[in-house]
């Protein structure tokens, strides 16, 4: 069993910043990749960013240069620093933990990010 607990969502004005956190616990030793997906109303869930235990990252083109993913392996926690936020970043953000890059993995409950003036 894997548990993922997200925090840090909220309401922010365009151009603002937020930092999401996701702490993993349970049977997670074999899981190498952590990251974030998001789902806006009426749209499919999409990749935001992933990071492997060794630090290799993968970002969606739409967030490159604005978002930074990082992780603390000792705390089994992944972070998403989101800067220069846009209204189109509004979505529920889901934490994901997977064994490899191509697995589906486990999901957190989601945290709402709303970018609006």
Image (cartoon, rainbow, N blue to C red):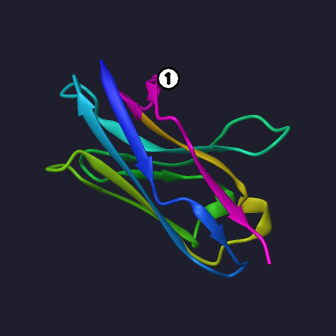
Q: Which residue is labeled 1 in the image?
A: 104
Q: Quadrant of the C terminus?
A: bottom right
Q: Nearer the viewer, residue 56 or 3?
A: 3
82 in the magenta segment: no
Residue 49 lies, in percent from the top left, at 51, 50
Residue 70 lies, in percent from the top left, at 35, 59
Residue 73 lies, in percent from the top left, at 19, 49
> Residue drawn 71% across and 60% down?
89
Q: Is residue 69 above or below residue 41?
A: below
Residue 105: name its quadrant. Answer: top left
> Residue drawn 23% across and 45% down?
76
Disc 1, SS: loop
Q: Is residue 84 above or below residue 94?
A: below
Please give the range of residues in magenta: 97-117
How many numbered circles does the render carry?
1
Residue 59: name its quadrant. Answer: bottom right
> Residue drawn 78% across and 67% down?
87
110 in the magenta segment: yes
Residue 83: name its quadrant. Answer: bottom right
């Amino acid at each position: 069993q894997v548990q993922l607990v997200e925090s840090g969502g909220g309401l922010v004005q365009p151009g603002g910043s937020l930092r999401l956190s996701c702490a993993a616990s349970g049977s997670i030793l074999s899981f190498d990749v952590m990251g974030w997906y998001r789902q806006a109303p009426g749209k499919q869930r999409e990749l935001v960013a992933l990071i492997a235990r060794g630090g290799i990252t993968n970002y969606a083109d739409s967030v490159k240069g604005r978002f930074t993913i990082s992780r603390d392996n000792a705390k089994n926690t992944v972070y998403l620093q989101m800067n220069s936020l846009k209204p189109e970043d509004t979505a529920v953000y889901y934490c994901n933990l997977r064994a490899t890059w191509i697995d589906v993995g486990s999901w957190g409950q989601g945290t709402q990010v709303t970018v609006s003036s």
